Image: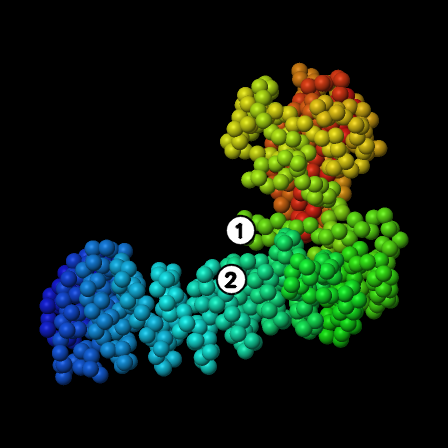
């Protein structure tokens, strides 16, 4: 290599095109073999520009003419070399900007040989530090390629536009109509490339137009296209939908057209969208009802529509003609007839029938008493169903009719699933929501906290989201309460007063956790235990008196009757055990600080499935200061293969007068399904 590099300059001064072609080919190989050579050859850019300009501006030459173009082979080689030399170098790019504009403007695009040069010119412009106007010119050249009858040229143009769309989206948008027309091309390769490019062009301003074109294309798309097209169409609809009504309409049309090609996550997102948007409950259930009456064969559409009818059936049959002129009139018998017809259809799958059975059960509390008897008969008729799942559901639902005092609560609407920061949801698909042990039927019965979300605060800052825990515990302020410092603790430097359910927080992230500054005690409402525990009665307490928990039995009847020693650890005992998750409690006391109790809680999961997103929160009475450390993890492996430990320290300011009381809240996802538990931890006597 070192023998050739110094001699390259002499080759570029030759007039023979064969020598120039081999010399430039040698330079390309040297640059691709050793990157350092690029810097050396950049000093030759003016010479290369001069050679290319002579080729472009020269007249007809018999010796080098190919279809009216002077030596296209040499022009292509020079353009490829300029692409390497101008990349990430502004000075070299400025030198070649003018000649590239001349090549893009003067080259004959009616001949294939000219298109070859234009293609290389466009790639060079988009690779170097070119001016904005030059980039627009290059994209316009590709736009002309799209109008060519040669499929090879159109394919090359679509592939190149897909690569450069991120560099200048607006310039590519100008050729949107031509790109959409490529969806009608009989060549499958052209259609696929056009489809990929359209997804890159979608934004808030053109989503309606492009979604309409994609829906039209979906109707006649071949099976190999439908799966990918459906997934991407639903994705861009979710990202750029101008409003929720248009979102619902578009997804319903996709479900009706695509059928089984609709991914599960699409129906899950639609369910979550409707559930979390009270303003479209009535609109969505009407649209889904109409869509279902039109198409009974699409199982995905049927499942989502049946779920919506079960949740919001009362809104479907309500008279809304005075509020919305476009509202349809649906009677209760019409709704039941539709579900009965769907459940008896032969193409209806077993999963869809399970949806219908659950919807019928929920409608018993949403429709009038006159329709309840017919609904009960339909449900009871499946107690002898050949499908075991249907039979079990029918038997369990029929049994619920005997528990009239709790049936309405069990059949409440499913709570809203929270969106994650990345835009995804924790929402399960409708299938998993209706098949996970029927837990979703009761709308979160095992989560006492969820029953408090309907209570809105009387006074609340408009910019802050409603927090039921903050509502119960009151506002957070700062006081001069001295902090208790434990020099032996590396992570926690102060004992915090009771702030309701306290979650472990980084000291640096919250100034109230810094040594010497503590949060003032929150004033829990008198219904704290009713709202968060729901099992023990709470005496009536004046609002200004705080919460006096002395004398209350917060724990189970099997509280260990062990008197705490003055020094050392106590025997380990079980503080919580439910749904396969148990918590072992270790308590340690020091004789020098009898009012301080060190607690270690160890959680294990005995279920055959994992528990993820595990989060521990704690609440204490006003007279106790609480310090919560960072947990050892947030996942529990199945079959008790690991444990998560949580360390606490409690300072009882009324030691000897009132006992140590602690309430904990666990939030987690069991096998992907969100769950929440609240329990009291009862400590041995004397703690």
Q: Secondary structure at mark 2?
A: helix
Tell whether 265 sits left or right of 123: right
Residue drawn at x 22%, y 83% as measured from the top left: 67
> Which residue is at a point 78% across and 64% down the rendered structure image?
332
Where does the C terminus fall, quadrant-wise? top right
The x, y position of residue 677, in whole percent, is: 72, 41
Q: Which mark is residue 507?
A: none
Q: Earlier in the sequence, mark 1 or mark 2?
A: 2
Closer to the eye: label 1 or 2? 2
Tag 1 residue:
422
Residue under pointer 2: 236
Q: Nearer the viewer, residue 306 or 87?
A: 306
Q: CA distance from mark 1 to mark 2?
A: 15 Å
- Contact, CB < 8 Å: mark 1 with mark 2? no
The answer to whether 314 appears left or right of 234 in the picture is right
The image quarter in which residue 641 lies: top right
Left or right: where 375 falls relative to 253: right
Q: Residue 10, percent across and down?
A: 11, 66
Residue 67 showing in the rendered view: yes
Q: Between 507 and 334, which is closer to the camera in this rendering?
A: 334
Q: Nearer the viewer, residue 136 or 640?
A: 136
């Amino acid at each position: 290599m070192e023998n050739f590099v110094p001699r390259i300059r002499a080759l570029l001064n030759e007039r023979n095109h064969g020598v120039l072609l081999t010399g430039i080919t040698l330079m390309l190989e040297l640059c691709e073999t050793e990157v350092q050579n690029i810097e050396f050859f950049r000093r030759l850019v003016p010479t290369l520009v001069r050679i290319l300009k002579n080729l472009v501006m020269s007249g007809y030459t018999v010796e080098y003419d190919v279809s009216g173009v002077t030596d296209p082979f040499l022009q292509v080689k020079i353009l490829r070399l300029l692409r390497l030399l101008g990349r990430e170098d502004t000075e070299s790019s400025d030198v070649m900007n003018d000649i590239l504009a001349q090549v893009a403007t003067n080259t004959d695009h009616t001949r294939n040989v000219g298109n070859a040069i234009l293609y290389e010119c466009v790639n060079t412009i988009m690779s170097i530090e070119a001016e904005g106007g030059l980039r627009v010119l290059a994209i316009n050249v590709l736009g002309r390629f799209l109008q060519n009858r040669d499929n090879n040229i159109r394919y090359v143009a679509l592939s190149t536009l897909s690569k450069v769309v991120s560099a200048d989206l607006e310039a590519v948008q100008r050729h949107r109509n031509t790109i959409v027309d490529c969806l009608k091309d009989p060549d499958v390769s052209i259609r696929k490339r056009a489809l990929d490019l359209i997804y890159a062009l979608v934004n808030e301003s053109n989503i309606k137009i492009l979604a309409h074109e994609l829906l039209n294309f979906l109707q006649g798309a071949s099976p190999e296209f439908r799966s990918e097209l459906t997934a991407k169409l639903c994705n861009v609809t979710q990202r750029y939908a101008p409003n929720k009504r248009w979102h619902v309409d578009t997804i319903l049309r996709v479900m009706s057209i695509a059928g089984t090609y609709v991914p599960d996550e699409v129906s899950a997102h639609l369910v979550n969208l409707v559930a979390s948007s009270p303003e479209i409950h009535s609109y969505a259930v009407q649209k889904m009802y109409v869509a279902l009456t039109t198409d009974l064969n699409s199982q995905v559409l049927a499942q989502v529509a049946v779920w919506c009818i079960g949740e919001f059936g009362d809104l479907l049959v309500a008279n809304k003609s005075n509020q919305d002129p476009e509202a349809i009139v649906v009677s209760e018998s019409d709704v039941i007839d539709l579900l009965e017809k769907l459940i008896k259809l032969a193409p209806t799958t077993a999963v869809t029938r399970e949806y219908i059975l659950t919807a019928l059960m929920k409608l018993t509390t949403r429709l009038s008493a006159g329709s309840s008897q017919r609904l009960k008969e339909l449900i009871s008729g499946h107690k002898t169903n050949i499908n075991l799942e249907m039979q079990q559901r029918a038997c369990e639902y029929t049994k619920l009719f005997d528990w009239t005092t709790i049936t309405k609560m069990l059949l409440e609407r499913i709570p809203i699933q929270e969106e994650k920061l990345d835009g995804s949801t924790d929402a399960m698909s409708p299938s998993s929501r209706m098949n996970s042990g029927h837990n979703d039927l009761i709308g979160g019965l095992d989560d006492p906290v969820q029953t408090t979300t309907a209570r809105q605060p009387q006074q609340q800052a408009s910019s802050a989201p409603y927090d039921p825990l903050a509502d119960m515990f009151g506002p957070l302020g700062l006081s001069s309460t001295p902090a208790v410092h434990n020099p032996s603790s590396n992570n926690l430097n102060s004992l915090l007063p009771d702030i309701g359910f306290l979650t472990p927080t980084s000291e640096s992230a919250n100034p109230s956790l810094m040594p010497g500054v503590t949060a003032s005690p929150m004033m829990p409402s008198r219904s704290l235990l009713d709202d968060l525990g729901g099992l023990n009665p709470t005496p009536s307490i004046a609002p200004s008196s705080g919460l006096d928990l002395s004398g209350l039995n917060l724990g189970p009847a099997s509280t260990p009757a062990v008197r705490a020693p003055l020094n050392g650890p106590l025997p380990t005992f079980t503080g919580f055990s439910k749904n396969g998750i148990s918590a072992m409690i270790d308590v340690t006391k020091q004789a020098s600080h009898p009012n301080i109790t060190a607690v270690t809680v160890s959680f294990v999961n005995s279920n055959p499935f994992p528990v993820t997103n595990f989060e521990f929160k704690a609440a204490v009475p006003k007279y106790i200061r609480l310090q919560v450390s960072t947990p050892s993890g947030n996942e529990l492996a199945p079959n008790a293969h690991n444990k998560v430990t949580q360390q606490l320290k409690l300072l009882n300011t009324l030691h000897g007068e009132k006992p140590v009381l602690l309430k904990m809240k666990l939030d987690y996802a069991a096998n992907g399904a969100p769950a929440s538990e609240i329990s009291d931890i009862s400590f041995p006597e004397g703690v």
